[in-house]
Every structure is written in structure tokens, then in C-alpha cells.
């Protein structure tokens, strides 16, 4: 009788020991990020560190950002939002820790929330020193040098949006976000 009760225990012990002899199951490996994706992630992290203090519009105003646009939207592409520009930063440099423009979208509580940044480079000094448009995180800036392409900005320039604080299904660096609206 005693051996019949021990048999299931012995079988379980044998199975457990056999399992210990096998290599442990490993989690499937995640695909490695491409160099471009890794660079974009590092750049977005740097942008977030540099702009985390600007979630309140008052902090942006204190840092010399001024509202430079109404809420910008496109009828089919989505919304950019309100642009707050620090004109003292607009020059011929690209610095992820000092974006020239902070972009805010209307928030459900009637306020504004920080959703993106925009980098703006003055074209004349940039073009005097470079043969190609500026780039950031592997992304080429949009060319707004032609008078009809400046969207109300008086100087020829290059710009690039980075949706650091709001997911954009159209792409992290696409200017308009279809999930937002000015309404």
C-alpha cells in the first residue's frame, strides 16, 4: 500500500529532475532597434528631459516663449496646435535640448497641454554653411524657404516637429496629428 502512494510522488520527482536537466525556457528575443530608431529614441528622451518643465504654459512664458499662432489645424491631416516661440533660440543650430517652439493643444479642462516641439532653423545662415537641409534623429527638416511655403513666418526657414509628449499615429515627426483638434 505504501509503495502505491509513493509511486506518484516518485514520478513527479523524476519529472521535476528531468525538467531541471533541460535548459530553462527563455523569453523570445525582441528584435534589435535599428540605429535610426535608437537615435530617434535617444533624441526624444533628450527633448522630454529638456521640456518637462514646460507642461504649464506659464513656465514657457517665463522662459521667453511667446504665443505665435492660433491653434493650427488642417481639414484632413489633423492638428498641430498653438505654437509658442522663443525667438532668441531661432538661429542656424539644431539643439534637441533647446527647441525653438513648444506646441500646445487644447485640453479637455479648458487649458492647454504640451504635445510636441518644433525645431526651426533660419535658412540664410544655415545655407551659408551647409549644402543640405538640417537633420535631427535621422529626419530631414521641412523646407520653408519659398515665400508661399512659410505659413506666415516672415523668414525663410527649415522646421521639424517632434511629437515628444503625444503619440502621433501619422509619425513622430509628421507635422499634423489626427488625434487632436482645435475644437
Image: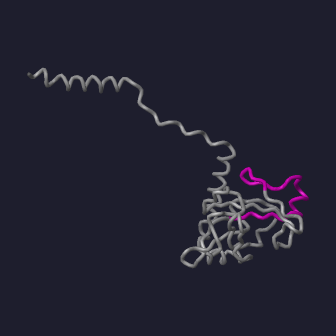
Occupied quadrant, residue 157: bottom right
Q: Is residue 109 visible?
A: yes
Q: Where residue 127 sits: x, y (%)? A: 89, 58
Left or right of 26? Residue 33 is right
Describe the colour scheme in one phrase.
Answer: one colour
Residue at 74 percent across and 50 percent down: it is: 138
- Give the quadrant of the C terminus: bottom right
Left or right of 179? Residue 18 is left
Residue at 75 percent across and 53 percent down: it is: 139
Residue 130 within the magenta-colored segment of the rendering: yes
Q: Is residue 40 above or below residue 181?
A: above
- Give the quadrant of the N terminus: top left
Magenta stretch, residue numbers: 117-140
Residue sitting at the far left: 1
Residue sitting at the far front: 76
Q: Is residue 86 above or below residue 1?
A: below
Occupied quadrant, residue 169: bottom right
Occupied quadrant, residue 31: top right
Residue at 12 percent across and 20 percent down: it is: 3
Q: Is residue 64 visible?
A: no
Q: Where residue 145 sits: x, y (%)? A: 87, 64
Q: Across the whole image, how many numbered discs are drawn on residues?
A: 0
Residue 39 within the magenta-colored segment of the rendering: no
Q: Where residue 27 sits: x, y (%)? A: 47, 37
Q: Where residue 5 sits: x, y (%)? A: 13, 25
Residue at 72 percent across and 64 percent down: it is: 118
Amino acid at each position: 500500500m505504501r509503495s502505491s502512494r509513493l509511486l506518484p510522488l516518485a514520478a513527479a520527482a523524476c519529472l521535476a529532475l528531468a525538467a531541471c536537466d533541460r535548459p530553462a525556457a527563455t523569453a523570445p528575443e525582441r528584435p534589435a532597434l535599428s540605429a535610426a530608431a535608437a537615435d530617434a529614441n535617444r533624441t526624444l528622451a533628450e527633448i522630454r528631459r529638456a521640456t518637462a518643465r514646460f507642461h504649464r504654459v506659464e513656465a514657457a512664458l517665463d522662459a521667453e516663449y511667446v504665443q505665435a499662432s492660433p491653434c493650427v489645424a488642417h481639414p484632413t491631416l489633423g492638428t498641430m496646435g498653438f505654437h509658442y516661440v522663443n525667438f532668441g533660440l531661432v538661429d542656424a543650430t539644431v539643439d534637441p535640448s533647446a527647441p525653438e517652439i513648444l506646441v500646445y493643444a487644447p485640453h479637455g479642462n479648458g487649458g492647454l497641454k504640451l504635445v510636441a516641439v518644433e525645431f526651426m532653423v533660419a535658412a540664410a545662415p544655415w545655407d551659408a554653411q551647409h549644402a543640405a537641409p538640417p537633420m535631427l534623429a535621422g529626419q530631414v527638416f521641412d523646407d520653408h524657404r519659398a515665400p508661399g511655403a512659410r505659413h506666415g513666418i516672415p523668414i525663410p526657414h527649415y522646421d521639424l516637429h517632434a511629437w515628444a509628449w503625444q503619440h502621433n499615429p501619422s509619425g513622430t515627426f509628421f507635422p499634423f496629428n489626427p488625434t487632436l483638434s482645435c475644437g
